[in-house]
Image (cartoon, rainbow, N blue to C red):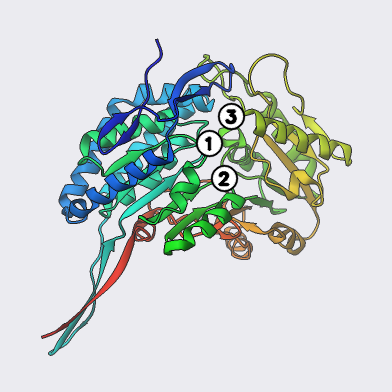
């Protein structure tokens, strides 16, 4: 018997006013569960509930909010097995990765709980004291994607609650179920109206981004959608945190130890089947090491066990949805038609499920779509270079700038090269690692604002200068 899922509005479970829609398992294409389809009127009710709750929640103490987040973390842990299973069934990733996502959600919630909101003393003289305080904004609208549905919801919601805001969340219609479970957990801990969730597609996202009672939008997703959100948010000058698309480049310097770095490159390129904003998506390799790197990556790709995430031994799950699978296949075929060499993978298996094997594309060039566009799937193009300055220029020759990496045995030189990359985070001998204490965000068309750490926390606040004449 399938579990029932509901909207949560003002602390109550509510059926969708437009009925339900089916959530599919990408490994089997079977229905996981029916999800409630909210109306725009229900969105308005959720925002009204959040606005009413804000009137008292904004004055809750730091101790109350810290305790609430720790209690939420406890409850996520208590429900870890059920959350992980639902993530696998609606998102597709292998069970071990879903379990890691739940564990990360717990750790991030606890870290956020213990962050402090500073009061900065700007002057304290004989006649005057000036303090800089941080106040909550109001109702925060969270719009989350389908690739890390629990983790990214935690990234959005926990700092909002910690700083005294209230929340209306709309998860992706492809992976809404575990986010509804998270909202139920949160709703059991905080006062009614502090946490609300509405699910559905048509009109709900635009309704959130244009809503005059919502004071901030935090969004993770594509650049075109981020641009639409920014235009829609102008009506009341909403604050925005936009973590948008990336096409992260990695550069292997000629002195790198290929044996030492190959595993790290493979894992960070194919993390979550490549469906990670900050995954390594373009790999620039010096001509002297090109063949050796390709050989190592192909061996690792061929060693993966592709299958249903709930099946024992699966290391590599499906692409999450049919549209993304079709895009990945299209980009590989375009590269093949334009002279690239598909060293492994590159063919969809027959049968049910949105499966695509890990694919290494050699002899790729910058003008191929597989390099110029973000594939967001299980494919890595490998590009030759002979001059490091040229590799840096080519890595930077894109409108986006989320992350980038340099791989080398010479850390001093690698740091100099990494600092020339036009991206929000530059890793050395690693990639795609995000940490709760290290601010993360993009530049150029990869968005603006940061998440994580105190810098990310304060994005959910407005500064107020308190000027005291003694």
Q: Relative to the observer, which residue lies in front, 93 or 30?
A: 30
Q: CA distance from mark 2 to mark 3?
A: 14 Å
Q: CA distance from mark 1 to mark 3?
A: 8 Å
- Earlier residue among tags 2 and 3: 2
Which residue is situated farthest in the top direction here? 1
Determine which quarter of the picture holds residue 455. Answer: bottom left
Residues at circles 1 and 3 in contact by the CB criterion of under 8 Å:
yes
The 10 Å Cα crowd at callout 1, few under 14, some 14 to 19, many 20 or more, is many
Q: Looking at the image, can residue 434 be seen?
A: no
Q: Looking at the image, can residue 148 be seen?
A: yes
Reading the image, the residue beneath label 1 is 147
Q: Helix, strand or loop at disc 1?
A: loop
Q: At which x and y percent is residue 115?
A: 27, 54
Q: Helix, strand or loop at disc 3?
A: loop
Reading the image, the residue beneath label 3 is 320
Q: Is residue 284 left or right of residue 128?
A: right
Residues at circles 1 and 2 in contact by the CB criterion of under 8 Å:
yes
Residue at 88% over, 41% down: 338
Above or below, 469 against 322 in this view is below
Determine which quarter of the picture holds residue 390. Answer: bottom right
Residue at 48% over, 18% down: 32
The 10 Å Cα crowd at callout 2, few under 14, some 14 to 19, many 20 or more, is many
Q: Is residue 137 left or right of residue 199?
A: left
Q: At which x and y percent is residue 113?
A: 26, 48
Q: Disc count in the image?
A: 3
Reading the image, the residue beneath label 2 is 277
């Amino acid at each position: 018997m399938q579990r029932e899922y509901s909207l949560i509005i003002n602390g109550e479970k509510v059926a969708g006013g437009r009925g339900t829609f089916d959530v599919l398992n990408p490994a089997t294409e079977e229905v996981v569960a029916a999800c409630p389809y909210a109306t725009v009127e229900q969105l308005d009710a959720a925002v009204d509930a959040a606005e009413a709750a804000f009137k008292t929640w904004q004055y809750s103490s730091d101790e109350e909010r810290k305790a609430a987040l720790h209690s939420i973390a406890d409850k996520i842990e208590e429900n870890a097995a059920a959350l992980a299973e639902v993530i696998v069934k609606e998102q597709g990733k292998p069970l071990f990765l879903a379990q890691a996502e739940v564990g990360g959600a717990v750790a991030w919630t606890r870290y956020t709980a213990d962050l402090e909101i500073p009061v900065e003393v700007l002057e304290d003289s004989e006649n005057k004291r000036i303090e800089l305080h941080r106040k909550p904004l109001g109702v925060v609208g969270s719009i989350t994607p389908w690739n890390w549905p629990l983790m990214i919801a935690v990234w959005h919601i926990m700092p909002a609650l910690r700083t005294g805001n209230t929340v209306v969340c709309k998860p992706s219609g492809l992976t809404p179920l575990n986010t509804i479970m998270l909202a139920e957990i949160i709703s059991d801990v905080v006062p009614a109206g502090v946490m609300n969730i509405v699910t559905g597609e048509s009109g709900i996202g635009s309704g959130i981004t244009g809503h005059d009672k919502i004071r901030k939008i935090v969004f993770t997703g594509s650049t075109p959608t981020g641009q639409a959100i920014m235009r829609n948010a102008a009506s009341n000058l909403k604050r925005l945190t936009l973590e948008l698309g990336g096409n992260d480049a990695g550069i292997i310097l000629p002195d790198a130890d290929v044996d030492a770095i190959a595993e790290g490159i493979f894992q960070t390129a194919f993390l979550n089947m490549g469906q990670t904003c900050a995954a390594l998506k373009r790999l620039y390799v010096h001509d002297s090491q090109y063949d050796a790197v390709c050989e190592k990556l192909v061996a690792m790709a061929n060693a993966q066990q592709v299958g249903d995430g709930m099946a024992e031994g699966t290391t590599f799950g499906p692409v999450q949805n049919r549209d993304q699978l079709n895009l990945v296949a299209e980009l590989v075929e375009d590269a093949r038609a334009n002279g690239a060499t598909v060293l492994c993978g590159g063919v969809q298996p027959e049968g049910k499920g949105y499966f695509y094997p890990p694919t290494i594309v050699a002899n790729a060039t910058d003008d191929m779509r597989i390099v110029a566009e973000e594939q967001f799937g299980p494919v890595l193009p490998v590009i030759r270079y002979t001059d490091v300055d040229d590799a840096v220029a080519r890595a930077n020759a894109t409108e986006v700038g989320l992350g980038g990496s340099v791989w080398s045995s010479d850390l001093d030189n690698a740091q100099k090269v990494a600092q020339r990359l036009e991206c929000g985070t530059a890793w050395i001998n690693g990639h795609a690692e995000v940490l709760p204490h290290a601010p993360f965000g993009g530049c150029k068309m990869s968005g603006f604002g940061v998440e994580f750490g105190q810098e990310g926390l304060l994005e959910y606040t407005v500064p107020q200068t308190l000027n005291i004449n003694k």
